[in-house]
Image (tube, rainbow, N blue to C red):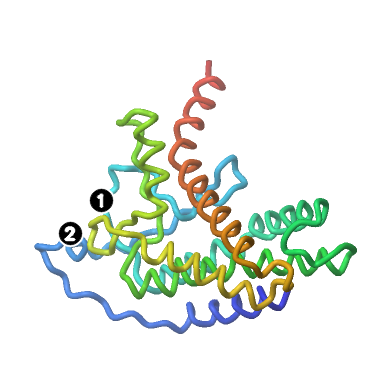
Amino acid sequence: MCLFVAPALLCAQLCAQISVPQPVPDSTNPADASHVVAPISNERILGVIPNFQAVSDPATPYTPLRKMDKWRLFVKETVDPYTFASSAAGAALSQWHNTAPKYGEGGEAYMQRFGAAQADVTTQNLFSDAVLASLFREDPRYFREGPGKSVLHRIGYATSRVVITRKDSGRNGFNFSGIIGMGMGIALSNAYYPPASVTGEEMGSRAGTSLSASALGNLLPEFWPDVRAKLAHFRHR
């Protein structure tokens, strides 16, 4: 648990203290033309799954997140109750099948798995959404394509956002913060994973799992508004 609590408390303090200089407005740059602060979403999918990183309306004019807001987004999604529940469920599944991280069996092993799962989420969010997103001037949010395109196009778009992101300038580019942050989180996990789980094969498996989770994490907010609208239609028939 300390692996998770310490970084979260540190980041909360940083969020409270960080000072970001205000940009000088530039009418030729859409990212600087507005004084509006980009809001962080409070939406949840099915009322449970956090959808904090999504910009659901494709028609929303782009406003980049400030550095302090990237840190706040990291803290918001990391300390959410759903994150704890997801880590607990993942640790239980790993415990049941005695899969990586291979801490063994019993209550102590389960708590180690839970702590490792929380540390994995915390470090990857920290590196990707806060530290590197600020360094590379990238926006960690997912910008929905919307129903104006075909389903296949939207699936391709959502999965491509794993490696493509929006820069603070409003242009698209390679997702350095997401990919490098994922790698840094996996590398750091070797410091607290048991030796049996610190192998090239296990690291490759964790990378594959992280990439798949990122793709799913984009597909859900892409199509959830469509599903929600359909459900509302059926309720009012």
**Residue at the extreme left of the image, as rendered:** 28
Q: Amino acid at mark 2?
A: Pro
Residue receiving disc 2: 30
Q: Quadrant of residue 1?
A: bottom right
Q: What residue is shown at x 54% (from left), y 82% (from top)?
A: 13
Q: Residue furthest top?
A: 237
Side (left or right) of 62 relative to 113: left
Foreground residue, 200 or 158?
200
Q: Inspect the image, locate mark 1, and give the three-letter code of the amino acid beneath it.
A: Pro
The answer to which of 26 and 208 lies nearer the viewer is 208
**Up/down of 100 relative to 24, above or below:** above
Secondary structure beneath label 2: loop
Q: Are marks 1 and 2 in contact (CB under 8 Å)?
A: yes
Q: Residue at x 78, y 69 (%)?
A: 112
Q: CA distance from mark 1 to mark 2?
A: 9 Å
The residue shown at (66%, 66%) is 118
Q: Position of residue 233 (x, y in %)?
A: 49, 22
Q: Which residue is mark 1?
A: 61
At numbered mark 1, what does the secondary structure look like: helix, strand or loop? Answer: loop
Dot 2, how many residues are within 10 Å of its Cα: few (below 14), some (14-19), or many (20+)?
some
Q: Give coordinates of residue 20: x percent, y percent.
A: 33, 79
Along the viewing direction, whichever of 105 and 78 lies nearer the viewer = 105
